[in-house]
Image (cartoon, helix red, strand yellow):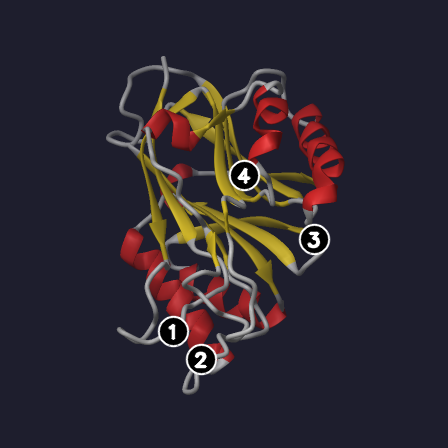
Amino acid sequence: MMRALTFNISAGNCSAYATNLSLQDKYQRVVQLIKQHDPHLISLQELDEMASQTIGGGLAADYTHLGSAESHCGSTHIWALHSLQASPMPSAGCVAMAKIPLPLPEGMSGTAGSAGYFVFAGCHLEPFSDGAPMRLKQLEVALRSMPPRCRLVLAGDLNMRNAEEPSVEGLGLSDASKWAGSKALFTWNSSINKYHGPEQRSYTARYDRVYLRGWSCQQLQLIANEPVTPGHLDYLSDHFGLLATLQLLP
């Protein structure tokens, strides 16, 4: 099985309730979180320079940094385990991409065979409800830069609303949550996570997603959805992350 992790870390700030957490502490905790879940693939969004250096340095022993892409808020970075022998591809707008050769190392694929490679992509798409046409265009640009119908794992903050799902599925992508049969996993939940203070508007959304082609998803779970301090309100980011357990389709 292959595990892919995506997390918008909201760099450059800490929770309004994080009275004893510095930015350096926050980024080190992001590294600890990643190592705790032991993913094969990592997509992080909204990194600033300090976050890039701290998190990149903390992952360097086990992961290859495969590139970054600038977005409307910081940058998106992607990594893969050294053993996957991944290689960077040119970014396509706000989408960072890499090639990972197949077949996968023993024990990772869940199925036999498949020569060639698959593409791993991380993204942070256009924000706000009126950004839907631009989000679709950003995905189309990224897909045109890949071989047609190639296997793909796309993970990131897509800023999507549910009404956009048919358009994205029309591009030949499948939502990991539908494969996994997951209930709605709200990666934005300001009803409980008042990261920006008590006056923050309360609502839920599935901004962060994993989309697949040539893969199925066996399990999808929230991460970073507990406060840093038990019983407190000091969440690590204003988003929760996702960890997807994937299986290569024949």
| Cα distance in 3D space between marks 1 and 4 | 39 Å
| Cα distance in 3D space between marks 4 and 3 | 19 Å
Q: Position of residue 121 (x, y in %)?
A: 56, 38
Q: Reading the chain from its start, which is encountered first: label 2 or label 3?
A: 2
Q: Reading the chain from its start, which is encountered first: label 4 or label 2?
A: 2
CB of mark 1 within 8 Å of CB of mark 2?
yes
Q: Label 1 sits on what residue type?
A: Leu
Q: Residues within 10 Å of mark 1 (few under 14, many from 20)?
A: some
Q: Reading the chain from its start, which is encountered first: label 1 or label 2?
A: 2
Q: Which residue is mark 3?
A: 70
Residue 140 falls left or right of residue 39: right
Q: Residue at x 39, y 64 (%)?
A: 31
Q: Label 4 sits on what residue type?
A: Ser
Residue 223 vs residue 71, the one in the foreground = 223
Height in image: 19 above or below 76?
Answer: below
Q: Reading the chain from its start, which is encountered first: label 1 or label 3?
A: 3
SS of the residue at dot 1? loop
| Cα distance in 3D space between marks 1 and 2 | 6 Å
Q: Nearer the viewer, mark 1 or mark 3?
A: 1
Q: Nearer the viewer, mark 4 or mark 3?
A: 3
Q: Which residue is mark 2?
A: 17
Q: Reading the chain from its start, which is encountered first: label 4 or label 3?
A: 3
CB of mark 4 within 8 Å of CB of mark 2?
no
| Cα distance in 3D space between marks 1 and 3 | 30 Å
Q: Which residue is mark 1?
A: 233
The quarter of the picture where the N terminus appears is: top left
Q: Residues within 10 Å of mark 3 (few under 14, many from 20)?
A: many
Q: Label 2 sits on what residue type?
A: Tyr
Quadrant assignment, res 115 = top left
CB of mark 1 within 8 Å of CB of mark 3?
no
Q: Which residue is mark 4?
A: 87
Residue 2 vs residue 89, the one in the foreground = 2
